[in-house]
Image (cartoon, rainbow, N blue to C red):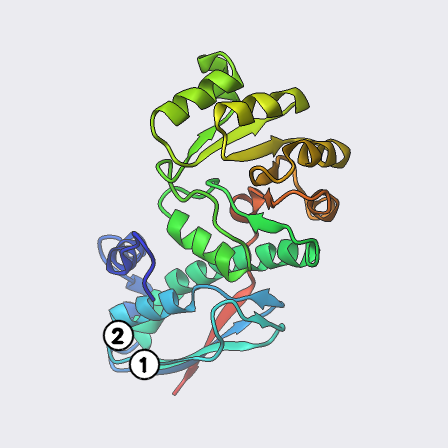
């Protein structure tokens, strides 16, 4: 699989180098005969949405190019507890050495995908679209945002150069919502997302050329009022403090999008294990 601006080879090398240290897997080298072979099954221990199996495969293959791997479920699949995700057979030392790196990757990305899916399911039927944010672990943004897509979300900005996003600190420095927005428009930026936290800022932002309004920390009643004022002239996005127990009421206000930082910021790792059996 290819992801924009993601170097799979570099990721695999860096991930394994971090774990191998200067002297490699001294446990496997001491305990496991060089020619021993293992077969194993990667299995979900909870109901999850799957993401990252292709990365695990790449990690295993880097240490054992001859490993036999069969991926048993698709990316984005929703599976029950006890589902086998991958079967593999190869050199025991290599597979044991790559095990933790492979599991960490799949657990982290599947955790994000699983949480994302719960939020997507919570707003089903409202017509609202779930967005992720840039609240990602440095160096893992491409993968974490890939995982949110596997969970059914749509990516917000990937990078700072995707669109202008004028937030409260920009406004504080520029002097006003309108002034900050006018400067972004004058710079020739096509997409100008403007955060507003008060109803009276909406007209100012629209008149200055905002192409998308981020309605920050507004309750459902205020969101409905804001949506009515905007009247579909630009997309609207609810953001700030969104939780699983509040997202449906927020989505039902008529906003185009709702963004949730915790998808990448707070998702727990999925419970996935890899059990090896001597062949």
Residue at 27% across / 56% down in the picture? 7
Label 1: which residue? 90
Could you say which quadrant of the image residue 111 lies in?
Answer: bottom right
Is residue 92 placed above or below 145 in the rendered structure? Answer: below
Could you say which quadrant of the image residue 190 lies in?
Answer: top left
Calculate the distance from the C-alpha at mark 2 to the C-alpha at mark 1.
7 Å
Q: Residues within 10 Å of mark 2 (few under 14, many from 20)?
A: some
Q: Which secondary structure lies at badge 1?
A: strand
Is residue 175 placed above or below 238 in the rendered structure? Answer: above
In the picture, measured across the screen, residue 274 lies left or right of residue 114, that is: left
Q: Which secondary structure lies at badge 2?
A: loop
The reply to whether dot 2 and dot 1 touch (C-beta < 8 Å) is yes
Q: Position of residue 277 (x, y in %)?
A: 44, 82
Residue 108 in sight from this viewpoint: no
Is residue 68 placed above or below 181 in the rendered structure? Answer: below
Which residue is outermost to the bottom?
279
In the picture, measured across the screen, residue 197 lies left or right of residue 75, that is: right
Residue 149 in sight from this viewpoint: yes
Q: Nearer the viewer, residue 178 or 166?
A: 178
If the image is split into quadrants, where does the N terminus sit? bottom left
Q: Position of residue 57 (x, y in %)?
A: 35, 71
Tell me, for residue 101, which label it has, or none.
Answer: none
If the image is split into quadrants, where does the C terminus sit? bottom left
In the picture, measured across the screen, residue 68 lies left or right of residue 234, that is: left
For marks 2 and 1 on the same chain, the one whose residue lies earlier in the sequence: 2
Which residue is outermost to the top?
175
Q: Nearer the viewer, residue 46 or 144?
A: 144
Label 2: which residue? 64
Q: Nearer the viewer, residue 62 or 213?
A: 213
Q: Position of residue 64 (x, y in %)?
A: 26, 74
């Amino acid at each position: 699989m290819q992801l924009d601006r993601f170097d799979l080879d570099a990721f695999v090398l860096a991930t394994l180098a971090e774990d191998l240290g200067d002297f490699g897997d001294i446990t496997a080298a001491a305990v496991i005969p060089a020619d021993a072979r293992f077969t194993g099954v990667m299995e979900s221990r909870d109901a999850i949405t799957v993401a990252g199996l292709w990365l695990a495969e790449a990690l295993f293959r880097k240490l054992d190019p001859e490993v036999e791997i069969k991926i048993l479920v698709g990316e984005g699949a929703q599976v029950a507890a006890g589902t086998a995700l991958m079967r593999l057979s190869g050199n025991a030392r290599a597979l044991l050495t790559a095990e933790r790196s492979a599991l960490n990757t799949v657990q982290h990305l599947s955790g994000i995908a699983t949480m994302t899916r719960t939020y997507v399911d919570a707003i089903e039927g409202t017509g609202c679209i779930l967005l992720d944010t840039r609240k990602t672990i440095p160096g893992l943004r491409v993968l974490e945002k890939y995982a949110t897509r596997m969970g059914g979300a749509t990516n917000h900005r990937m990078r700072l150069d995707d669109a202008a996003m004028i937030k409260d600190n920009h406004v504080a420095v520029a002097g006003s919502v309108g002034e900050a927005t006018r400067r972004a428009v004058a710079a020739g930026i096509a997409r100008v997302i403007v955060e507003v936290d008060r109803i009276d800022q909406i007209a100012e932002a629209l008149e200055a050329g905002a192409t998308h309004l981020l309605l920050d920390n507004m309750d459902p009643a205020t969101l409905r009022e804001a949506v009515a004022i905007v009247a579909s002239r630009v997309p609207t996005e609810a953001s700030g403090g969104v939780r699983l127990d509040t997202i449906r009421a927020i989505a039902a206000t008529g906003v185009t999008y709702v963004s949730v930082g915790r998808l990448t910021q707070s998702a727990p790792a999925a419970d996935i294990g890899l059990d090896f059996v001597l062949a």
